[in-house]
Image: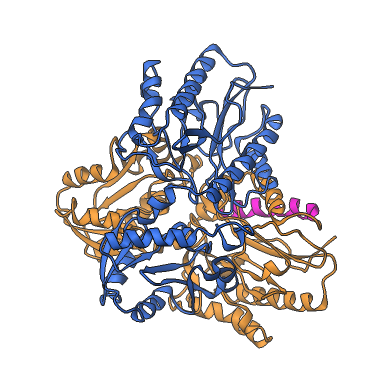
Chain colours: A blue, B orange
Amino acid sequence: MSGADVPPGSIDTRPTRLAVLRDALARADLDALLVSSLANVRYLTGFSGSNALLVITAKDCILLTDSRYATQVEEEVGGAATVRIESTNLWTGLWAQLGTLTSVERIGFESTHLLHRDFARLLEQGNRWSWRPTTDMVETLRAVKDAGELAHIERAIAMAETALRHTIPMLHAGLTETAVAGILERHLRDAGSEAFPFPSIVASGPRSALPHARAGDRVLEVGDFVLLDFGAVTAGYCSDITRTFVLGRASDEQREVYDIVREANLRASGALRVGMTGMAADAVARDYIAARGFGEAFGHSLGHGIGLEVHEEPRLARVVESPLAAGTVVTIEPGIYRAGWGGVRIEDDVFLSVAGPRVLTGFPRDLHELS
Amino acid sequence: MSGADVPPGSIDTRPTRLAVLRDALARADLDALLVSSLANVRYLTGFSGSNALLVITAKDCILLTDSRYATQVEEEVGGAATVRIESTNLWTGLWAQLGTLTSVERIGFESTHLLHRDFARLLEQGNRWSWRPTTDMVETLRAVKDAGELAHIERAIAMAETALRHTIPMLHAGLTETAVAGILERHLRDAGSEAFPFPSIVASGPRSALPHARAGDRVLEVGDFVLLDFGAVTAGYCSDITRTFVLGRASDEQREVYDIVREANLRASGALRVGMTGMAADAVARDYIAARGFGEAFGHSLGHGIGLEVHEEPRLARVVESPLAAGTVVTIEPGIYRAGWGGVRIEDDVFLSVAGPRVLTGFPRDLHELS
């Protein structure tokens, strides 16, 4: 959310985010946090540029960026941080800024976002301070969406669904997967998507059995599964949706596999509850698919959080023992993949509140035979 | 380059790359290199998946990935590496694989590609070995393109130029920048581009003065500069091109600025020579722009290498003292940006050989007034 995105009369949630983070810092016995993840910087300050470091202390919030962003940073950040434009290198600026802060000795850094090269800088030029690795301090806050964030995600979903509606009538045998991606992405842009949250997946026929296929030069044929996995972005927030179609008439086998995936999707999204573990959520879909005889064919996790990044906390996976918080938005994306034959995945985005799950994606899940 | 991309009868260059890297390892007194950069993994093995670790020793080349990529890795890698599919976590697999290697003690890792979290794994679970940070060991090889790589880049350039040719007649006042991006990206897909190497920049009017603007919701108006900076990807290789147009009749001031940037572009690409420093190349354009009175208005570097990544070695910038090697492909992209008024950037891709520079992008650089 950028400063410019705060509609008149609405609440700027950045001060609250900062206050909660400061509490967490105090509990972790840290005097400061060095934020190097750009998504975390954006969440805390609104700045969406590609080069930034952010220092949070009990009193200060200092954002360092370079002169390319002088105009943009002012518009986006407003009073949410003290902005320093660095003419040389952000790290040089960082030592200077830290030097002005009193009572700052123990500083956390983001272990999952800092490269070894930059960690070496902390130990060398930054050796006046004591550096402590941290994990997910900001990500934990980001997992719980406020109303403004939820509205952005819903808008990103609406863009994706509009694009999909316009794309379906244009799909036919003879198109390459890459051409299909072009049609879909054009409609995403026309719907106002400011970016693509990840490389669009268009996987047809046997390639639909590859969960990580992108679009390739395979030509669509009658009888194919056509799997589209894509999203839109607005104000930095992502949507992520998958639908699988059949080109022409579905075979009985295609229909059987499709129905199992759809039922697994519906069961899992309906079963989500606050306090449930990621593991338990994953098991709802996995156990159903296994009971129907396709346990080996669902090789990936059930889902993941979406927000400023398309993969964020929480994770719905076999190994996740932490409970789901109220206010998360997660994908529910079971699939069945059979090498050489094809695959089906149906993915929705679900908001979880104390009142239960609300499926945000409204696009029909009935088996659609493309004519 | 994937195994599947080696045309019949052509030479597989991966063994040569590996041999050169092994020489460099021996000179650096390293028994092995742990490669975690996915672009470097692809360069050495052909594998294009999103999860991999690669270990190179004097004798072995071991690639670790997960079961999602079982089919793909076999097709892409062939005999270029020993492939291990890990069922749990690549790091667990790594310790097991390293344990089987005799005479391996000092192992280099990629300091600019390894996160602190993973560095901590090396020091903890990997404490049987002695870990040494390295920089650019594979990147230095990648900077020099072989004939197959050059052909891929030229194909990616042809895709981008075809898309631009088809886009120009569709540009008119009243379109949003985002809609323009959609038109351009659709044509990139129709030309066969397998991905977008970076988020397309469509910057109009005053926004053309922001070198890092993406496409936004601004509506194109008569009199605007319209700056398009985009590329295509084929077989993993990128192109990167920028052209700036005027919507309607150019003003004298627009024409003056445009002509200066075009002349700076022509001078810089014509002056490139093997052995020249990145700094000297940058100065050719920068000094000319400064002499014409716009020195302050060219805030970024002249250019960068392109290949498997859209920003790679070498860099053409004020601080780069290393000499340009024969066989590099670099962008030449001077610009003039005036806040509130607009900006012009003209970017070409240039192959540098001992015979001198060859500009690969053929798209006209004359000022084009969109009607």
Q: Is residue B165 magenta?
A: yes
> Residue at horizontal 58%, vertical 33%?
A218
Left or right: B76 as drawn, with respect to B366: left
Vertical side of A107 occupied by B157: above or below:
above
Q: Residue at x 84, y 65 (%)?
A: B248
Can residue B155 be seen by looking at this rendering? Answer: yes
Residue nearest the viewer, comparing A35 with B144 = A35
The picture places residue B111, in percent across and down from the top left corner, at 32, 62
x%, y% of residue B200?
A: 62, 56
- What is the number of callouts on the image? 0
The stretch of residues the image draws in magenta is: B153-171
In reply to whether residue B257 is colored magenta, the answer given is no
Residue at 68%, 87% (x, y): give it.
B293
What residue do we see at 64% from left, 77% from top?
B267
Front position in the image: A251 or A64:
A64
Instruction: Out of A225 and A131, give the one closest to the viewer.
Output: A131
Task: Please say if A318 is above or below A8.
Answer: above
Is any atom of residue A339 visible in this view? no
Quarter of the rendering containing residue A296:
top left
Q: From the viewer's perspective, is B368 left or right of B294?
A: right
Q: Quadrant of residue B224?
A: bottom right
Q: Main secondary structure of the magenta part?
A: helix
Q: Position of residue A326 (x, y in %)?
A: 42, 41
Which corner quadrant holds the C terminus of chain B?
bottom right
Q: Look at the picture and state if A263 lies above or below B261.
A: above
Q: Is residue A300 left or right of residue B308?
A: left
Q: Can you give x and y, in whole percent of width and height, for residue B175 in the image? A: 77, 54
B366 lies above or below A136: below
